[in-house]
Image: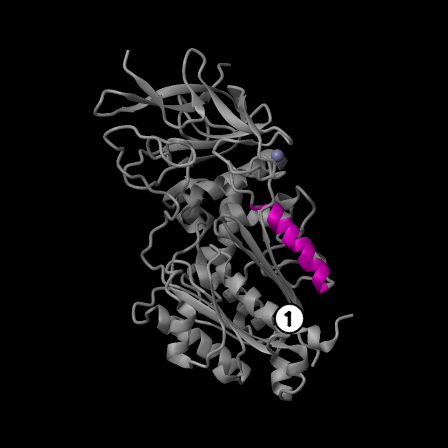
Amino acid sequence: MAKQVPLVDYLELGDDPHLVANECTSCGARFFDRRNACASCEGTAFKKAAISTTGEVRAYTIVAFAAPGVPVPYVAALIDCAGTSVRANLLNVTPDPEHVTLGMKVRLITEVIGTDDEGTEAIGFGFEPLGG
Amino acid sequence: MASASDELWILGIHMTNFGKRPESDIVDLAAEAVSGALSDGGVTMKDMGVIGAGNLMAANAGIGQQLQKQLGQTGIPVYNVANACATGATALRVAAMAVKAGECDMGLAFGVEKLSGAGLLSGGSRKEDSSTWTPSGRYGAVAPVDGRIGTEIMPGVFAQIGMEYGHKYGGTSFELFAKISEKNHSHSTLNPKAAYTKKMTLEEIMGDVMIAYPNTRPMCSANCDGAAAAVVVSGAKLKTLSKEQQRRAVKLTASILTTDPWEESCQILPDVNTLTRNAATQAYEQAGVGPSDLDLVELHDCFATAELVHYDNLMLCEQGGAVDFFNSGATWRTGTTPVNVSGGLESKGHPIAATGIANVWEVATHLRGEGGDRQIAGAKVGLTHVIGLGSACGIHILEKSAA
Ligand SMILES: [Zn+2]
């Protein structure tokens, strides 16, 4: 199997791929990027917190017109994963408003976004509709 | 009760025609707006004690000093400001703060931008993937993420902001958002300074090029060239000026700037709601008025989906009631709370740094009774609002002079 790297460092690969946030140990605020201090309470201690891999679509848009090199259309969404908001594309869904709905239940999946010159695969993530 | 010296007034104000202005460079546009504001107020550069200068796209170029070279190098302090789409409102805040603090009795603010032909997609870009995956930035990304992890393009970001409101309260649809755009394009037909003055039917708006569902092209703010400028004067100084100057002066009863306080989802989708609500609360308190006192509102309809949420954020309607409020016809120029009678950013245009002063010009013009064909009859109080992503919110409330 090819060597793999995650598209972003908050995507944990392996048998059970999931997102990991930096959680403020004093107030519980979660951040996907590196923070110097907590934007909510100014605390400076963080621990890793695994994010639920299922959630609900709270907002979406279907991007039809994008920067050169970005394939369209694609569905961008805000997903509520058990109280933590996540930004991602919706995958395995027809990109039109008849098939994408607010409140839709989704789960995290990963996909290969490309292979570099050394044969390493970059793995991205998105969410697909939960069956039924 | 504020003493006269604590009062702030707009003495002179001007906006250029918005649109394609190939004959004018950025300094020409700024000079046109500033000359217009100075002569409108019956004053000159020599009367100014401070300049708040706004330009976003060339924020390191010192547009304030460039303007002085054309109209008068009097040696006064210049504050060049950049605050995304709130840049113009921020420049006005600088002049207002200086006068309020007593550092001078008159201040100038202007905002200018040249954006014609800039395209729709500020915020989105995609570089080529590198030949070896190397993590960079605060997310350790090995490749560009726009379009791979959600969207960074503004039409898409603001589409989600409108959709989120719909998910929370219900009642939104593609057609509803398009109807908001229909209103603003209809209003623009009465505004000769607007970049686009063509009435558009609902069918034309919904059938136009889709940018980011549910925002089609005419539901997005129009990139264009333009500038606006204002002269702020203290109440004490205004009393020494002519009766005509006092009659046309418009009282600046609230001048507020806020940023976005931390909210759970703000790292995922910019929160344009909380800071607007906070700014509105402060502005109504400072001005001693409420939403029901407003005769007109110019709010930041950078996209049709944004206008809806700001009805709620500015408390023009009950919480969660923006859809019903719009459907009642309240925000058409014939309604109880006319919103964006200028045509808004979707048709008047959005030369970024000019917007936060151009909207003050629109309201001031109505309060002076100089609105011509689009005058809102008997207008006495109006509110202006801008949002700059990042985020910053500027709100100004204006009142007609009793003189
Ligand atoms: Zn914290």
Mark 1 residue's CB less than 8 Å from ligand 1: no
Q: Quadrant of residue B193?
A: bottom left
Against B17, residue B116 (above or below) is: above
Could you tell me residue B135's position as x and y percent?
35, 31
Queried whether the magenta region covers residue B275, the answer comes back as: yes
Q: Is residue A113 visible?
A: yes
Q: Quadrant of ligand 1?
A: top right
Queried whether the magenta region covers residue B293, the answer comes back as: no
Q: Is residue A57 visible?
A: no
> In terms of secondary structure, where does tag 1 sit?
loop
Report the front residue among B113 and B267: B267
Residue shown at the point (41%, 13%) measured from the top left: A14
Q: Chain of mark 1?
A: B
Could you tell me residue B267's position as x and y percent?
52, 37
Could you tell me residue A71's position as x and y percent?
31, 33
Report the front residue among A112 and B137: B137
Could you tell me residue B128's position as x and y percent?
26, 36
Q: Quadrant of residue B294?
A: bottom right
In this view, which residue lies farthest toward the left? A117
Residue shown at the point (60%, 53%) measured from the top left: B258
In this view, which residue lies farthest toward the right? B1
Against B403, residue B200 (above or below) is: above
Query: Is B67 situated left or right of A49 in this image?
Result: left
Mark 1 neighbour density, 10 Å: few (under 14) some (14–19) many (20 or more): few
Residue shown at the point (36%, 62%) measured from the top left: B114
Position of the N terminus of chain A, as image quadrant, is top left
Q: Main secondary structure of the magenta part?
A: helix
Query: Residue tagged by mark 1?
Result: B101
Magenta span of residues: B272-287
